[in-house]
Image (cartoon, rainbow, N blue to C red):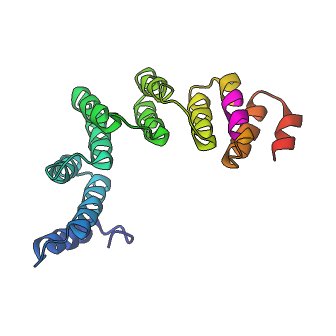
Amino acid sequence: HMELQDYPSAIAAFSRSLNSLDQSDTDFELDVMYYLAAVREVYGETDKAIEVYTDILKNGKDIKSLFQRGKLYLSEELHEEAAADVAMAIEKSRDYSLYIDIFQVYDDQNMTSEGTKYLERALEVEPDSGADYYQRGRVYYCMKDYEAAKAELTEAIKKEDQDAILLLGKVYLIMEDAASARAMY
């Protein structure tokens, strides 16, 4: 039903699934709850999607739920609630992608300067692998600091991170260095 965009039927099916569990299966229940929240969001039931994420969070802090609920709060212009969820989600996080995702959510709401603060926080994470340098290059790329992105991506490539090659090619193109971009590709 979800794939057919029959959202009322999908909501009903996911809800029945949760209500008919004979035995506790935490992983299954969590999976169904994520689908239910996603369908409610797409269907325009933001408040009910927030409720589902809140129910998930009753079982403990879950970074994905905090991020998703924070995103929904932001879409409802509940900025303090969004900031609180995001703060809990990134607490002690080393996941550069999470910081970038948070930036993107703020950027999508035309709050780029607020989102950039999260990118700056991502740069406080000390890199210890080629993948970390690649992620830092992505952060600088989002910040449009192409010189810094180039430096981080070059370091990632030295540490044999293959993902950095394509992004460095993009950076070179933005910097109007077609020859270096061609060399990367």
Quarter-wise, where is residue 74 in the image?
A: top left
Q: Residue at x 73, y 41 (%)?
A: 157
Q: Residue at x 26, y 69 (%)?
A: 10
Q: Nearer the viewer, residue 66 or 134?
A: 134
* Side (left or right) of 156 relative to 180: left
Does the magenta-highlighted stretch encompass residue 158? no
* Side (left or right) of 179 relative to 35: right
Q: Residue at x 14, y 72 (%)?
A: 24
The mark total stands at 0
Q: Bounds of the magenta span?
A: 150-156
Q: Position of residue 44 (x, y in %)?
A: 27, 51
Q: Position of residue 41 (x, y in %)?
A: 28, 52
Quarter-wise, where is residue 134 in the image?
A: top right
The quarter in which the N terminus is drawn is bottom left
**What secondary structure is the magenta-colored segment mainly?**
helix
Q: In the rendered image of this protein, does residue 24 appear above or below residue 104?
A: below
Quarter-wise, where is residue 35 in the image?
A: bottom left
Q: Nearer the viewer, residue 124 or 70?
A: 124
Q: Position of residue 97 (x, y in %)?
A: 48, 42
Q: Position of residue 109 (x, y in %)?
A: 40, 32
